[in-house]
Amino acid sequence: MLRDAPRVFEAIEEELKRSPATVAPAGRVRQEDELAASFTHLSTSSARTEQARESGIEKGRDGTAERVRFYILADTSYGSCCVDEIAAEHVEADVVVHYGRSCLSPTARLPVIYVFTSHPLDIPDAVQAFESTFSSKEEKVVLMADITYNTHIPTLHTSLLSAGYTNLLTPPIIHDPSSQIPNRELDASIDLKEYSLFHISDPPQALLLTLSSRVKEMFIYPTSFPAPSSASTPKAIQANTAMTLRRRYALLTRLSTCPVFGILINTLSVANYLSSITSIRSLIAQSGKKSYTFVVGKVNAAKIANFSEIGGWVVVGCWESSLIEGSEFFRPVITPFELGLCLQGDGERVWDGRWRGDFGGVGEMVAASSSKVDVDEEEKKEAERGDQDEDSEEESAPPEFDLRTGRYVSHSRPMRTTSSLTSPPGSHQSGGSTEASKVLTRRAKGDLVTVNGMASPGAEYLRNQRTWQGLGSDFAATEASLEIEEGRSGVARGYTVGEDGERR
């Protein structure tokens, strides 16, 4: 894509010059719909780009000498499928032209014009692969392609209708990852369970997991073939996500006893990501667990391995980038949907195979968890009407075991054990208590480190388990030297070391 950037730059500049009333006197973009329509017919031929280079846009529509400026944003802040609004704001852009494949996640700040590009596709081979996959002409099939191959869907659809197929659906592209088929428009009355999916090009893994429980079968027509051979004909491959779903379920059951979660921000441009982070924090807090929020840029195993006190990670990103898999990660990485299942008890957790990669359902999970917490609070108040010890709730709670190792876990909910410390003064005291008893406080169980009156598992880990706590932390174990030594002096090309004047 980067090698095409100069030609695309010049082609867009020429189209903007020819498009009427697209630039206001202050440089603000207007009539984005007309501009987007003109971008659909972009040409990067050398003749037209050479003409644009010679003429340029030296004057605005109002006659001023100000030129409309373009910037090529070569590197992305996060995933290449997302619109990079952060980099665009660094150059004070008014509109972003996203060139290439996209996840179509809704943006929050800037208007976006998409140029998806189009890759070549051998239509006769695709028709032959479709006919070998679906022998019945009445088979109900959803015909779909990756964004960069979507321009071939009308031609392929016409060819299949000529071949006798009658029950074909070709949903148009929309900007809605939470729809029945992500970013595709379908009538709500259509039951996808009756339809099979025929997908052109390899889809993202998140799309396969999302549709695994929504459609009858999934077939993928790969576009990355080896050298063509007359003896072999391209065939569609049936997708099987059972192994991946079992692995995802094993990860979330492994984290069911995790006391500390890390919320990993993997986007700064998807709409409503901030409110979703707040909801995830609330969901984790209602379960008696601790959460910390991290922004590390592009996610890799080396970055998040620095935080060994985190037992599991929750990714907040677009619906494609939220699915992060790999054996190199020190701790499991799950999605917000998987977090909702993870925080449920072993007796309540039921997974029917559904999966979603976006964070659209976080609000519903928070509402369900809040109602459950209210019921638990009422039951606890009824149990506390008698004289009971403060730790009776903790001691009477059912034991929790790690399903992976079989070991008993005594600290899976560290924030719930210290709820008595954060209650208002005098809330647990009878009317006949003396004034002296009000000054007594009970230590948190396990003597957890507190920050601003709240237990902090991260600070506790730093105090007791981290062997290295930063520069200078190891000076306490060594005796300081009483001798004064002369250090280096000079410039980088040649330092003078010591009293002998040795140069290095």
Image (cartoon, rainbow, N blue to C red):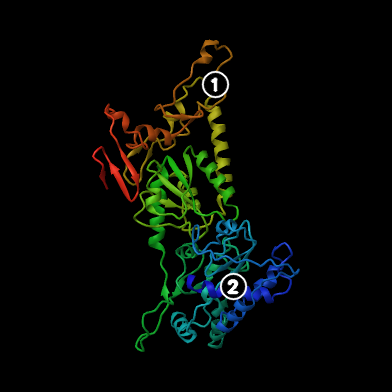
Marks 2 and 1 sit apart, C-alpha to C-alpha, by 61 Å
167 to 179, vertically: above or below: below
The reply to whether residue 183 is in sight is: yes
Q: Position of residue 294 (x, y in %)?
A: 48, 46
The reply to whether residue 195 is in sight is: no
Q: Which residue is tagged 1? A: 428
Q: Nearer the viewer, residue 265 or 9?
A: 9
Residue type at the position of mark 2: Pro
Residue 279 in which image quadrant: top right
**Which residue occupies 29% across, 43% down?**
496
**Which residue occupies 48% across, 21% down?**
388
Which dot marks residue 122?
none
Residue type at the position of mark 1: His
Q: Position of residue 411 (x, y in %)?
A: 40, 35
Q: Position of residue 484 (x, y in %)?
A: 29, 30
Q: Position of residue 387 (x, y in %)?
A: 50, 19
Seen in the image, is 113 located left or right of residue 132?
right
Q: Residues within 10 Å of mark 2 (few under 14, many from 20)?
A: some
Q: Nearer the viewer, residue 271 or 204?
A: 271
Q: Nearer the viewer, residue 459 or 184?
A: 459
396 to 53, vertically: above or below: above
Kind of element beneath mark 1: loop
Q: Residues within 10 Å of mark 1 (few under 14, many from 20)?
A: few
Kind of element beneath mark 2: loop
Point out the tag, 2 or 1, that comes first from the N-terminus.
2
Q: Which residue is tagged 2? A: 171
